[in-house]
Each structure stands twice: as C-alpha cells, then as structure tokens.
Image (cartoon, rainbow, N blue to C red):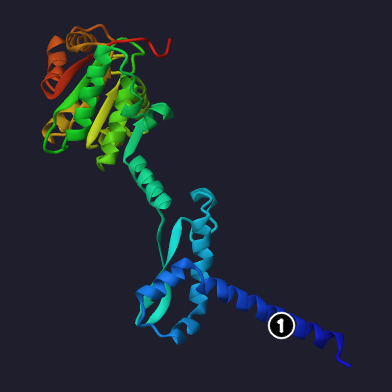
Amino acid sequence: MDSIGSSLNRWMDKDWKERMARLEKEVFAYPGVIDFKRRHPHIPAEEYEKNKAALFEYKRERSNCDACPGLENCPNLMQGYQPELMEDKGKVTVAYHRCSLKVHDDEKKKRQALIKSYYIPKEILHASFDQVDMDHESRAKAGTAALHFASTTVPGEDGQGLYLYGKFGVGKTYIAGAIMNELAARNIGSMIVHVPDFFREIKESLSDNTVREKVDSVKGVPVLILDDLGAESMSAWTRDDILGVILQYRMMEKLPTVYTSNYDYSELEEHLTYSQKGGNERLKAKRIMERIRPFTEEVFMDGQNRRG
C-alpha cells in the first residue's frame, strides 16, 4: 500500500504536468507567438522547445499589455516596457521596448524638465494655447503673436522677444506659460520669473553671497520670461546691477526675453526712472529700455479680469 506522501507526490506531479501542458498550449496558440513563427520559418521546432521559458515570459508580459491597466498600474516586470520576441543567432529571446504610454510619459517629463520657474503658480506651468480664451480682439492678437514667437524663435540666432502688457488679470501670465510649453515641445528650455519676488530674493541673498549665482542661473537660459515687470519696488541697484546685467548678457548672446507687465513701454520707462530713494535717473532708465524696446514686439492685451 502506497504511503500518503507518495500518493500526494504522484498527484502533484500529474497536476503540475497537466498545468504545464495547458500553459504550453496557450503559449503556442498566442497570436504573437504564431506571428513570430510565421516570420521566422527557418527556426527549427526544437529551438522553440529549448526556449519555452522565453516564450512563457513573452506571453505573460504581453498579455498584461493586451489588458493594459495604465502606466501607473502596469504589472510588467519593467513598468512601461513591452516584450518583443527576437531571434538571436537562431535562438528565441525576449527584448523589451517602451510602450506608447511610457514614451508619452517620458516625453512629458523631458518637456517639464526644460521648464523652470521662480514663484509662479503650478497651473501656469501647464498652460496651453488651446485653452487661451479668444473672447477679445486684443487677446486673440496676443495669443497669435505669442504662438508665432514660441513656434519660430531660435535662441542664440534671433534675440527678438515679446512684450505683453495690459491691465491686471487679463491672462498675460497664462499666455507666458503657454509659450513655455510650446517651447518645450521644440526642446527649447525656458524659465519664467516673477520679477517682484525674484528681486526680493536677490536682496535677501546679499547676506549669504549667492547673488551672482542666482543672476547667472537666470541670465543664460535660452528663453527668459520676466513676469510682472514694473510691479516691483525698484532700487537703483536692482535696476542697474541685476536687471541691467541680465538684459545686457541676453542682448549680447541673442537670447530672447518675454515680458509681461501692466505698463506699456513709456510707462515702464517712467517707472524705471525713479528709485526707492526718490532719485530721478532718466538716463539709466533709458539704458534699460534700450535693451527691451528694440528687442521685443509690444503687444497689448485687454479683456475680462480673470481674477476678479
């Protein structure tokens, strides 16, 4: 009489063989395997027998792709990678490549890495020209000018930028964000800086000697967007040694700059004339404007206040 242990082993051995036979049948009936065999008629049957482990792996991982639950929930061993049967010197092997979702996600992260910001709301960093409201003639013209700039500018070759101005809350910063994303799609890096907060940080950086480091991080980006220029409390130092240095470098290197402001050119020049100490320095203001006016297209924006 057989022991319980030997009987159990025989049952388990039989069950295992049946399961393996069933799995093997499913693997060789899988469309991807059938198609591979059709395209590689020179590979002998014994090679498929020797490399059944590769076929099992392919079918398991590819079945996950067939019922894709989305990139974040991908159950494959390498998340976001699809298996592909390959021939390697007559042997059947499995190679992996990024699926379309993974490619799209990587491209999105790559574009996001091209976009940097100082003190800008997160929603602005996801702005799109598709979402720009064209409910006002001037807004439509501004959107068209901004899209043309973002689609055609070549930093280092063409230093011409854009100057968007208009009253508070009409969407200037949003369009600036849309410019950044359009540039990222062209693999052009950009940075958007909220000028009042940036100048405040620069002043605070005097205590730890990081002013030059912060200025250098801004002045050399391919496309710089200075948001809300004119809303800051201007000092002679921030005007001449910070803003002036940044704009001089960009002018020399033919790096385009985009501005948003509540002021037109003349009003901005007037703003730059007066420092916090009450001095009237019109000549120095004109020097700054000489690095803005000839290198930008002045575009007016009007419309409903989106923040009110």
Asked if residue 262 is positioned above or below residue 62 in the image, the reply reads above
Counting from the top left corner in percent of width and height, residue 270 is at 20, 8
Residue that label 1 marks:
14
Counting from the top left corner in percent of width and height, residue 306 is at 40, 14
Task: Report whether residue 240 is seen.
Answer: no
Asked if residue 126 is positioned above or below residue 2 in the image, the reply reads above
Counting from the top left corner in percent of width and height, residue 147 is at 23, 28
Quadrant holding the C terminus: top left
User: Quarter of the image holding residue 25?
Assistant: bottom right
- Frontmost residue, 101 versus 10: 10
**Within 10 Å of the Cα at label 1, are there few (<14), some (14-19), or many (20+) other Cα atoms?**
few
Q: Give the residue displayed 27% in from the left and 19% down from the top.
A: 260
Asked if residue 95 is positioned above or below residue 202 in the image, the reply reads below
Q: Give the residue displayed 50% in from the left and 68% down from the top.
A: 30
Quadrant holding the N terminus: bottom right
Counting from the top left corner in percent of width and height, residue 36 is at 40, 72
- Frontmost residue, 281 versus 292: 292
Q: Give the residue displayed 76% in from the left and 82% down from the top.
A: 11
Q: In terms of secondary structure, where does tag 1 sit?
A: helix
Asked if residue 264 is positioned above or below residue 115 in the image, the reply reads above
Instruction: Locate residue 105 relative to residue 283 in the image: left or right.
Output: right
- The outermost residue toward the bottom is 1
Q: Give the residue displayed 12% in from the left and 12% down from the top.
A: 283
Instruction: Locate residue 308 relative to residue 224 in the image: left or right.
Output: right
Instruction: Locate residue 177 relative to residue 257 in the image: left or right.
Output: right
Hey, what amino acid is under mark 1?
A: Lys
User: Quarter of the image holding residue 152?
Assistant: top left
Task: Report whether residue 15 is seen.
Answer: yes
Q: How many marks?
A: 1
- Frontmost residue, 79 versus 20: 20
